């Protein structure tokens, strides 16, 4: 199966729960205000978000008024173009600046953060980069063990302390080691934490401050991992983490497990944070750079 086919396959639930409903209302002979209101309801319940929904609906309403939309095929094309416009251009993780390039990875429990880190490490090492993982999730011994397995699988190094150690100290030691060995990339794992728990968020701020002290240009990327199946809660998480430590990009996991892939639009429109990566399956290659045009084409294909 090709990459595009795998993307289509991974988005099957969203296509069925969201896009097929949209397409069904545009098979009618007449596109009127009732049709547009029905579209609005579908978009809202698919977690596209208030602002993105309003932009799509207003765009189509204007096109209908001007007579720019006739048959269902033209509606579909107009809708696709507007969705791509909302998502903007592709914004993958791009390495820049002095080495090491530091990715601070954050998120709540159970979103697939450590797995995302492992898959990213595999990608970077396969591209010829040297990678060091920092096991700053020191609350769970299992988290350190899981990261060790991924490091071995990816051919990456790892810096770890005993369970219960200071997470910021692990991050600092990893960056110092990377500077000494001239390692290209450091990816820091952090403990999953509820975005509503203030003490845990304060600790995350401390990790960031220590990273900045270790090397003034880092972290170049603060990657928030969110679970697409949580819908609007993923948007709330993104808001809280962004306010606390400044998120630069989102990795959206488990898109293959939800009918509410519309959350991609809400994150981009309401927060202005680019979705850098999406997960559409269990395989290493199923964590892929988010390409808005490819994403929308796969939804409607």
Image: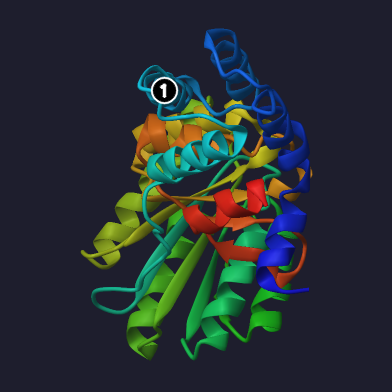
Please, which residue is most extreme toward the top here? 34
The front one of 111 and 164 is 111
Quarter of the picture holding the N terminus: bottom right
Please indicate, yes or no, whether residue 276 appears anywhere in the rendered image.
no
**224 relative to 114, above or below:** above
Please indicate, yes or no, whether residue 42 appears anywhere in the rendered image.
yes
Location of residue 120 in the rendering, given as x and y in whole percent from the top left corner: 57, 70
Location of residue 56 in the rendering, given as x and y in whole percent from the top left corner: 45, 27
Residue positioned 29% across, 63% down in the render: 218
Location of residue 266 in the rendering, given as x and y in whole percent from the top left corner: 49, 32
The front one of 213 and 21 is 21
**29 relative to 15, above or below:** above
The front one of 26 and 283 is 26
Q: How is the image coloured?
A: rainbow
Location of residue 20 in the rendering, given as x and y in whole percent from the top left corner: 73, 35
Instruction: State how many labels appear.
Output: 1
Say which element carries label 1.
Answer: helix
Please, which residue is most extreme toward the left here? 216
Q: Is residue 112 left or right of residue 124?
A: right
Residue positioned 71% across, 56% down in the render: 8
Quadrant position of residue 101: bottom left
Q: Residues within 10 Å of mark 1 (few under 14, many from 20)?
A: some
Q: Is residue 281 left or right of residue 122?
A: right
Q: Is residue 195 left or right of residue 104?
A: right
Q: Disc 1 marks which residue?
A: 51
Residue positioned 51% across, 87% down in the render: 127
């Amino acid at each position: 199966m090709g990459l595009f086919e795998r993307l289509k396959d991974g988005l099957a639930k969203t296509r069925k729960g969201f896009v097929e409903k949209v397409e069904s209302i545009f098979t009618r002979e007449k596109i009127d205000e009732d049709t547009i209101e029905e579209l609005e309801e579908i978009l809202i319940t698919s977690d596209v978000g208030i602002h993105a929904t309003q932009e799509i609906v207003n765009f189509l309403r204007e096109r209908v008024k001007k007579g720019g939309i006739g048959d269902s095929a033209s509606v579909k094309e107009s809708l696709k173009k507007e969705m791509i416009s909302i998502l903007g251009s592709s914004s993958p993780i791009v390495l820049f600046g002095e080495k090491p390039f530091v990715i601070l990875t954050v998120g709540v429990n159970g979103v697939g953060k450590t797995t995302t880190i492992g898959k990213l490490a595999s990608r970077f090492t396969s591209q010829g980069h040297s990678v060091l993982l920092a096991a700053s999730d020191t609350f769970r011994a299992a988290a350190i063990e899981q990261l060790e397995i991924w490091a071995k699988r990816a051919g990456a190094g790892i810096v770890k302390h005993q369970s219960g150690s200071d997470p910021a100290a692990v991050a600092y030691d990893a960056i110092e080691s990377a500077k000494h060995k001239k390692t290209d990339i450091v990816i820091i794992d952090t403990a999953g934490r509820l975005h509503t728990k203030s003490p845990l968020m304060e600790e995350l701020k401390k990790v960031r401050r220590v990273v900045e002290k270790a090397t003034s240009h880092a972290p170049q990327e603060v990657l928030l991992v969110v679970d697409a199946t949580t819908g609007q809660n993923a948007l709330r998480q993104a808001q809280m983490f962004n306010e606390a430590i400044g998120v630069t990009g989102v990795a959206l996991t488990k898109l293959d497990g939800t009918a509410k892939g519309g959350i991609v639009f809400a994150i981009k429109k309401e927060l202005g944070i680019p979705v850098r990566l999406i997960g559409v399956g269990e395989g290493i290659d199923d964590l892929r750079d988010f390409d808005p045009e490819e994403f929308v084409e796969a939804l409607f294909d």
